Amino acid sequence: MHESFAQSAQPRQTRFLPFEAGGGRFAIPAGQIEKVALLSSLVGVPGMPPHVMGFFPEADGLCPVVCAASALGLPPGTVTPESAVIFLRSEPRLAIAVDRVPGLFEAALESGCGEHSFNGLATGTVPLGGAMTVVLDAERFLAAEEKMRLAAWTGHARRRIENWPPPAASE
């Protein structure tokens, strides 16, 4: 009698960018991220909702920056020199402010998290540094209605900045 044992497929390794926000550890697949920058060049605009921290000026306009902890239903952290902005590959353009970004790592997505985990953002978990880290989907950071409101707020911010009076000339 001849028995054949199918080899189990190895889980596919994916690159993730881990980050800390609101006291939790999270990761986003690297393919959903455009770039990472220090949280230093934000332009604040009066009248924005509390979870919109400001706008990051770029050559082609303004990119809204949302507090990741608030989006996850967690208390916001404190801005430190390690605080960063993660620019997501999303439509509309969006960046999230996080407490810390340690660097890229590779792992296999271990399990699903259920649709209601962390406001529906979680897609699974990955092992990182001996602990499980929640993986988030960048496209789920904003619901359709929130995307429309954010586009309006971005337009409002752009108009305020464009109409800002120039500094008075010194004599």
Image (cartoon, rainbow, N blue to C red):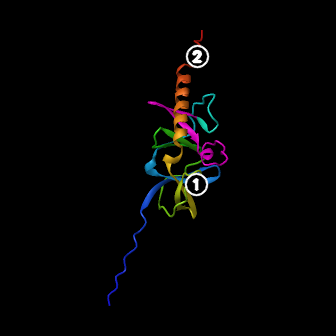
- The answer to whether 5 appears left or right of 33 in the picture is left
The foreground one among 13 and 147 is 147
What is the x, y in percent for residue 84? 56, 43
Q: Which residue is rendered at x = 51% and y = 63% of the image?
A: 111
- The amino acid type, in three-letter code, at marker 1 is His
Front tag of 1 and 2: 1
Which residue corresponds to the image point at 46% horizontal and 40% vertical from the top-left? 91
Q: Which residue is mark 2?
A: 167
| Image quadrant in which you'd find residue 166 | top right
Q: Could you tell me residue 113's position as x and y percent?
A: 55, 59
Q: How many marks?
A: 2
Q: Nearer the viewer, residue 1 or 79?
A: 1
Q: Which residue is mark 1?
A: 116
Q: Residues within 10 Å of mark 2 (few under 14, many from 20)?
A: few
Q: Can the viewer see residue 37? A: no
Segment tinted magenta in the rendering: 54-81
